[in-house]
Amino acid sequence: MNQLSVKALAAWLDDPSRPQPVLLDVREAWEVQTAALPGIVHVPMRELPARVAELDAAREIVSICHHGGRSMQVALFLERQGFRVHNLAGGMDAWSREVDPAVPRY
């Protein structure tokens, strides 16, 4: 499982020559309502084992949470299932601090 910095994700999302990843946000609904990246797939961590079949195994996945802990657990789980997955190091908090200060911090 790879750790992906928020700046590296921003560069990836801005690069039209690269296939876009699935942005898997594993936070709770209230967290996603507070701050989220556009185009996410929202599957709360506790629901993922029952919903893993909804994910596209052909695409790379970036696992996202608030600070990077829950998303790391999800990334490890998905890697064991055969997915190509990256953990967003620092999560949405780092995104707000380092990439887009307009995204609310909580």
Image (spheres, rainbow, N blue to C red):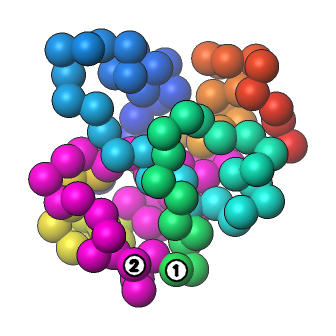
Q: Are marks 2 and 1 in contact (CB under 8 Å)?
A: yes
Crowding at label 2, few (<14), some or many (≥20) Cα neighbours within 10 Å? few
Q: Above or below — where is 106 with respect to 12?
A: below
Residue reaching furthest to the right? 106
Q: Which residue is drawn at 28% across and 32% down?
A: 20
Q: Which residue is drawn at 44% across and 66% down?
A: 74
Q: In this view, does 20 lie to the left or right of 45?
A: left
Q: Which residue is drawn at 80% across and 45% down?
A: 34
Q: Is residue 75 left or right of residue 66?
A: left
- Residue 66 in sight here: yes
Quadrant location of the C terminus? top right
Q: Callout 1, which amino acid?
A: Glu
Q: Which of 56 and 27 is in front in this view?
A: 56
Q: Which residue is drawn at 38% across and 22% down?
A: 13
| Residue under pointer 1 | 47
- Residue 86 in sight here: no
Residue 78 coordinates in the image, percent (x, y): 30, 67
Q: Above or below — where is 3 with respect to 10?
A: below
Q: SS at mark 1?
A: helix
Marker disc for residue 51: 2
Residue 18 coordinates in the image, percent (x, y): 20, 22
Q: SS at mark 2?
A: helix
Residue 19 coordinates in the image, percent (x, y): 20, 29
Crowding at label 1, few (<14), some or many (≥20) Cα neighbours within 10 Å? few
Residue reaching furthest to the bottom? 50
Q: Please give the range of residues in magenta.
A: 48-75
Quarter where residue 105 is shown: top right
| Residue 60, magenta (yes or no) | yes
Q: Above or below — where is 60 with respect to 26?
A: above
Marker disc for residue 19: none
Q: Callout 2, which amino acid?
A: Arg
| Residue 66, magenta (yes or no) | yes
